[in-house]
């Protein structure tokens, strides 16, 4: 079995553990009830998107520094996954928002900045699709990949910098986390599962890119 | 404090959307990998 397949099976097992933690181990939240369990998808999805867009930055800088296309391959693969996980973040957040806030969407700082993040990287992928020549495509995409990364701290700190309906960060914030340990454990289990899934999909996507480049050559 | 109703439909919808999106993307990658690995069909010449 290849390393990629082993990673895939590991990710699948971790997702099963994560689901068990989300529905079997984590308690019913005192105020929100069971709708709070959406957080075990929503929060890991956005954290995974941060990692993905961080890798786009790494790949973009790597390409501009070395002009080696393997860095561009990393950036492109990570961008696709970042868009996917940001889409899941927005969708799951919207579904959570309807019963809790009474609305599918509001133009608060966190939601708006996340939507901007999503659109920036959709634009990145569209830019890549319009350029035929590999080096030209990589160069233009690298610039967008570097500039787009500025959105990541804006999204994360938006709840602190501006008045927002969205709750403040309960993890990765400057203050100690206020969440109960079982909820934190379930969140951690799902974050690990999403990270493994991301790693698997990234290796698979990069392998597909290598195969398609070899076919085209 | 009055806790909210459970809204299980919303919970299932959120997990369902995530599963569908990830499953669709993964299947697309697997299909592309298979297509890229399979050899190109030979070009057949029309008999004269």
Image: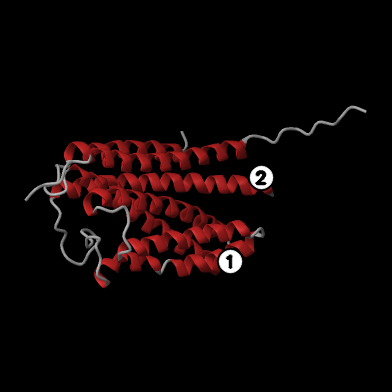
Q: Quadrant of residue A127?
A: bottom right
Which residue is most to the right? Answer: B48
Q: Secondary structure at mark 2?
A: helix
Q: Give the distance between the C-alpha atoms of the residues marked 2 and 1, in whole angstroms.
A: 22 Å
Q: Nearer the viewer, residue A34 or A75?
A: A34
Q: Residue B36's x, y, as percent?
A: 61, 40
What chain does badge 1 belong to?
A
Label 1 sits on a secondary structure element that is: helix
Seen in the image, is B7 located left or right of residue A89?
left
- Which chain does the residue under circle 2 lie in? A
Q: Is residue A149 left or right of residue A135?
A: left
Spot occupied by residue A40 in the image (x, y as percentages of width and height): 26, 46
- The answer to whether any part of residue A215 appears in the image is yes
Crowd rating for badge 1 (residues with CA inside 10 Å; few <14, some 14–19, many 20+):
some
**Going 42% across and 43% down the picture, which residue do you hit?**
B21
Determine the residue positioned at 27% across, 41% down.
Answer: B11
Q: Is residue B13 above or below residue A153?
A: above
Q: Tell me, for residue A215, which label it has, or none.
A: 2
């Amino acid at each position: 079995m290849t390393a990629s397949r082993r990673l895939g099976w590991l990710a699948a097992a971790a997702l099963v553990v994560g689901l068990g933690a989300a529905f079997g181990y984590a308690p019913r939240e005192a105020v929100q009830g069971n709708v709070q369990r959406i957080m075990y998808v929503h929060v890991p999805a956005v954290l995974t998107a941060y990692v993905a867009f961080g890798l786009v930055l790494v790949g973009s800088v790597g390409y501009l520094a070395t002009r080696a296309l393997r860095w561009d391959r990393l950036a492109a693969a990570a961008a696709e996954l970042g868009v996917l996980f940001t889409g899941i973040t927005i969708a799951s957040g919207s579904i959570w928002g309807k019963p809790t806030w009474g609305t599918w969407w509001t133009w608060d700082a966190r939601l708006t900045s996340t939507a901007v993040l999503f659109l920036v990287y959709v634009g990145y992928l569209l830019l890549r699709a319009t350029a035929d020549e590999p080096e030209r495509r990589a160069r233009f995409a690298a610039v967008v990949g570097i500039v787009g990364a500025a959105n990541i701290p804006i999204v994360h700190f938006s709840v602190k910098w501006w008045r927002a309906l969205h709750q403040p960060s309960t993890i990765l914030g400057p203050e100690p986390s206020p969440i109960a340990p079982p909820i934190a454990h379930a969140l951690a289990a799902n974050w690990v599962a999403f990270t493994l899934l991301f790693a698997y999909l990234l290796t698979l996507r990069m392998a597909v890119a290598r195969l398609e480049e070899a076919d085209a050559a | 404090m009055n806790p909210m109703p459970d809204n299980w439909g919303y919970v299932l919808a959120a997990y369902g959307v995530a599963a569908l999106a990830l499953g669709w993307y993964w299947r697309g990658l697997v299909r592309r990998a298979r297509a890229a690995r399979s050899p190109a069909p030979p070009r057949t010449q029309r008999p004269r």
